[in-house]
Amino acid sequence: MGNLVSICDIKDDVHHILDLAIKIKAGEVEDKPLEGKTLAMIFQKSSTRTRISFDVGMYQLGGRAIFLSSNDLQMGRGEPISDTAKVLSRFVDGIMIRAIEHHDVLELAHYSDVPVISGLTNIEHPCQALADVLTIKEHFGTLENKKICFVGDGNNVCNSLLLIAPLLGMDISVACPKGYEPDEHILSIAKEYADERNTEVTVSSDLKVALDNVDVVYTDVWVSMGDESEELQRKLDLSPYQVTCELMNLANDEAIFMHCLPAVRGQEVSADVIDGSQSVVFDQAENRMHAQNAVLYHFLKDD
Ligand code: CP
Ligand code: NVA
């Protein structure tokens, strides 16, 4: 039994899961592979894409999903995560959780007898990264030697991209102001993966350096869920990193624009970029479901 809390958890399976996602999207797997299976979905934070895509995905695979707001669970009143994990394991075949604290998901996975899939924490967003690489592969036909630049706040979405890019033969650069660098531990693992596969992982505050020879320009909100108290400071510090047409011109001519959504037009990205011809943000959103269906198939299907 495995879990998907970090991209590191699937480092040896990432090619397989991506191929599976392409097959599932093309309708090339058996009908209802998860018939009779139930996924519990715990949400400690808001969601549009993650909630809908897991719910519809489970339905398409022949199973069902149960939405559990953490406020309605006894966990929200202090029941230990370990007891919650053990009880849910008696009823369901998998647990998806969007959590405030990454360590809570690790604890849930430790005590659970069924696979635990992260739907975002403060540290990572692995399902998003899988959908993103699926989208890039569909667009360019390959991932090998493609370069992605993450612009802005080195957050959870950035961390998962840093881990997945080198595993798939991509280069990745991060363009961020001082103080907004990605997680140090994740960065060191990403650099190890890159060394093993001869790819590059770099971080720079210089936009021109980071955007040199880039095929994918990616950004995310400046104020992630939980960062609201820092909103004013963040807007000040990150304003030079807004993705505008001028910034897009620093990347390759054929470069695409990506964003995990939800987006704030006029902050991390200008409206003409996100709503323009280089943007693939809605393909990305749709691919959340196809990528996650592959994850669900991989972790929940009986052999
Ligand atoms: N990208 C993403 O995870 O969106 P939601 O917050 O709407 O789930
Ligand atoms: N970085 C954002 C991603 C939302 C999908 C957040 O954590 O709020």
Image: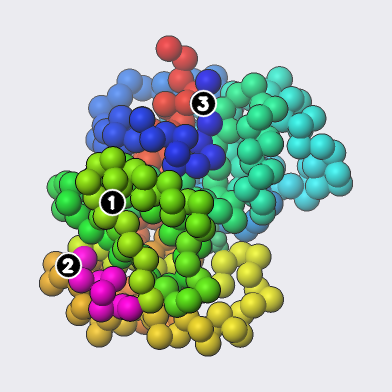
Q: Nearer the viewer, residue 183 or 274?
A: 183
Distance from Cα at disc 3 to Cα at disc 2: 37 Å
Residue that mark 2 sits on:
213
Q: Earlier in the sequence, mark 3 or mark 1?
A: 3
Residue 78 location (% of width, % of height): 86, 44
* Residue 106 lies in the magenta stretch: no
Compared to residue 275, the image places residue 16 above or below, namely above
User: What amino acid is labelled 1 in the image?
Assistant: Thr
Q: Quadrant of residue 17?
A: top left
Mark 1 residue's CB less than 8 Å from ligand 1 = no
- Label 2 close to label 1 by CB (< 8 Å): no
Residue that mark 1 sits on:
135
User: What amino acid is labelled 2 in the image?
Assistant: Asn
Residue drawn 39% across the image and 80% down it: 241
Q: Secondary structure at mark 2?
A: loop
Residue that mark 3 sits on:
2
Q: Secondary structure at mark 3?
A: loop
**Residue 39 appears anywhere in the view:** no
Residue drawn 43% across the image and 51% down it: 188
Number of disc labels: 3
User: What amino acid is labelled 3 in the image?
Assistant: Gly
Magenta segment boundaries in residue numbering: 206-214
Residue drawn 64% across the image and 41% down it: 105
Please tell me the numbered disc located at residue 87.
none
